[in-house]
Image (tube, helix red, strand yellow):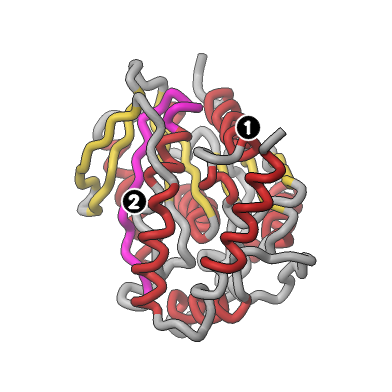
Amino acid sequence: MFQPLFEAGLRRTMQHLVRPVLSKSFPLGVQRRYIRQAYRTSFLPGGIRLSKTTLGGVPAIRLTPSQSPRGTLLYLHGGGYVMGSASTHKGLAGYLARHTDCEVVLPDYRLAPEHPFPAAPDDAQAVYTALLDEGTAPESLAIAGDSAGGGLAVVLAMRLRDRNQPLPSSITCFSPWTDLTEQALFAPDIEPVLHAGWTYRAARYYANGMPLAHPLISPVYGDLTGLPPLLIQVGSQEMLLNDARRLADLARQHQVDATLEIYNNLWHVFQVHAPQLRRAREALAIAGQHIRSNFPD
C-alpha cells in the first residue's frame, strides 16, 4: 500500500534535486560530482561479491552472485556518454546479477568530451572480446545497458555483426538513448529527470563533429538485421519514450525478436531505484528472465 507513496516521493526528489542539476546552467564537472553522490542510494543487494579488474585495457568491476554463475552479462552504464561510471551503476548491476544468476561485468568506458566517439564503442568491444578470449562462450554472454549505455549495447552488437565476431545471446535496454539528433523526442506531461538542452549538449560532446545520425551514434538510423533477441523497458514519463518505441519498431522491421515494455507513470531508468521500488524490482526480474531464457539449457 505504501508503494504509490514511495513512487510519488521519488518522482518529486528527481524533479527537485536531480533534474535542475542536469541542465545547461551547471558545468559538466559539477554534474559529474553530483550524480556520483545521487547514485549512493542505489546500493548493492546482499550476496553479491564485487571485485575490480581490467579487460581489454579497460577498467571494470565484476559482480558475482554467491552461487556459481550461469552466464556472463556485460552491462554498459548510462550518463549521456559524458558521466556515470561502473561505481555509480554497481547497485543496478548487482540487482541484475541477482536476477540473472550471472557474473555482471561493468566497464568504465571512456567518456566525452575528453574521449569522444568512437571511444565508448571501442572500449565496449575491447571488453567483450576480452571476455571471449577468457573462454566465455558467446551463447552464455549477454549485453545490456541503460540510457546511453542502452544505445551503446545495440551499437556494440551492430559492430560485432559487421566485423563477423560472435554475437551475444541477447540484448537488454533500459530507457535507451538511440537518436542523438533529438528529432522525435516524446513530450510527457511530467519529465522528472532529463532536459532536452542537456542531452543536446551531451550529444555534441560525444559526436565531436561526426553526424549525429551516424548509425553507430544513433542506432535508430542503422540496420539491426541479424541481432539477437531484444528487450526494451522504458517509462511513460520520459522524453526518450519515442527512442525506445522507434528502436523496437526498427528491430521488428529487420526481423529481430523485440519486446517493448512501457511502465506507466515511471521515469528515466527507474530500475536504478530497485532498493526502494517494487515495480523496479519486478522490471529487473523480467529482464533477468529474458537474459536467462536466451542462454543454453
Query: Residue 93, image x and y in percent?
Result: 42, 40
Left or right, 121 with respect to 240, comes to left
Eye-nearest disc, 2 or 1:
1
In the rendered structure, find residue 26 and report the number of the disc placed on it.
none
Q: CA distance from mark 2 to mark 1?
A: 23 Å
The kind of residue on which mark 1 rests is Glu
In the shown orientation, is residue 170 left or right of residue 112?
Answer: right
Q: Position of residue 184 (x, y in %)?
A: 74, 71
Instruction: Say which of 227 and 116 sits in front.
Output: 116
Q: Is 21 colored magenta in this rendering? A: no
> 197 and 112: which one is in front?
197
- Which secondary structure lies at badge 2? loop
Frontmost residue, 227 versus 205: 205
Callout 2 amino acid: Ala
Residue 68 lies, in percent from the top left, at 33, 17
Residue drawn 33% across and 20% down?
A: 66
User: Mark 1 falls on what kind of element?
Assistant: helix
**Viewer-side residue, 65 vs 7:** 7
Residue identified by numbered label 1:
282
Q: Is residue 198 visible?
A: yes
Give the mark, 2 or 1, whose residue is nearer the N terminus: 2
